[in-house]
Image: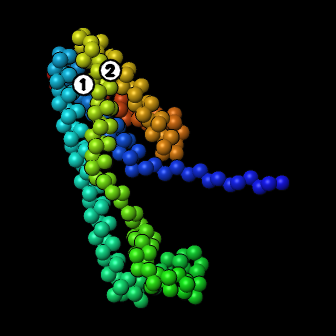
Amino acid sequence: MPATPHVEKHFTASDTVRDVVIGMADGLTVPFALAAGLSGALAASHVVVVAGVAEIAAGAIAMGLGGYLAARGDADHYAAERRRELYEVRELADEEEREIVQIFGRYGLNRAACAPILTHFHNNHEAWVDFMMRYELGLEAPEPGRALRSALTIGGAYIVGGLVPLLPYMLIGELSDALRVSVVCTLIALAVFGAVKGHFAGIKPWRGALQTVVVGGIASAAAFLLAKWIGG
């Protein structure tokens, strides 16, 4: 009988997916909480819209800049560590050999078993450095253009998420009606977003949806009640 090919299915969330999660999560919850809080203070719908748009713009810029700096920092750190490793394999080869043997020793290989690998690495310093970067330091080479792409992805996801709770205030003049519609739309969006995030994170979609709805609901309820209490 022909053997059934074994196909392994593993999903590792890409950096882009993580950026979307970061931007969308904050975009849905922060403007939602702000709009609910202003509604609790009985602000007019147009006031909620103006404040919400300003918050979305500021939040998207701040989040995008944070993503850019984080990705840029990772790239700079990787480059600095790679330069250090390249110096060590050239000038401190004996010590680097011991580190390789220690790494493979975790899997039951002794120095004799590592000899062909050591010989190969002495003839290919770039491969040696690649190995040490990944298995000694646990660092992966950053993708080119990652910093700018991260900034745009996080900022864009924040804007998309932030518009969900704000749109009802743009379309409905009555504050109480706009608030109710905003709550329903945002909770639905939070549930859908949480389910999708749960799928990528490897947890049950309903659990991811519940977690996200609870966090967003608590944030908005707290802001609403606080603003209503302050506003008297």
Secondary structure under tag 1 reads helix
Q: Is residue 48 above or below residue 11?
A: above
| Quarter residue 108 falls in | bottom right
Q: Residues within 10 Å of mark 1 (few under 14, many from 20)?
A: many
Question: 42 left or right of 28?
Answer: left
Question: 85 left or right of 58?
Answer: right
Q: Tell me which label, 1 or 2, sits earlier in the chain.
A: 1
Question: 199 left or right of 31?
Answer: right
Where residue 22 appears, as percent x and y from the top left, is: 34, 43
The residue depicted at 17 percent of the width and 26 percent of the height is 51
Q: Which mark is residue 187?
A: none
Can you identify the residue that label 2 sits on?
182
Q: Is residue 131 above or below residue 46?
A: below
Q: Nearer the viewer, residue 99 or 214?
A: 99
Residue extending furthest top? 174
Q: CA distance from mark 1 to mark 2?
A: 9 Å
Can you identify the residue that label 1 sits on?
35
- Under mark 1, the amino acid is Ala
Q: Nearer the viewer, residue 160 or 110?
A: 160
Residue 124 seen from this side: yes
Where residue 91 appears, as percent x and y from the top left, is: 33, 87
Q: Residues within 10 Å of mark 2 (few under 14, many from 20)?
A: many
The residue depicted at 20 percent of the width and 22 percent of the height is 49
**Is the N terminus in the top left, top right, bottom left or bottom right quadrant?**
bottom right
Q: Is residue 29 above or below residue 100?
A: above
Where residue 125 appears, as percent x and y from the top left, is: 41, 80
- Under mark 2, the amino acid is Ser
The residue depicted at 44 percent of the width and 30 percent of the height is 191
Residue extending furthest front? 123
The reply to whether the C-beta atoms of the residues labelled 1 and 2 are less than 8 Å apart is: yes
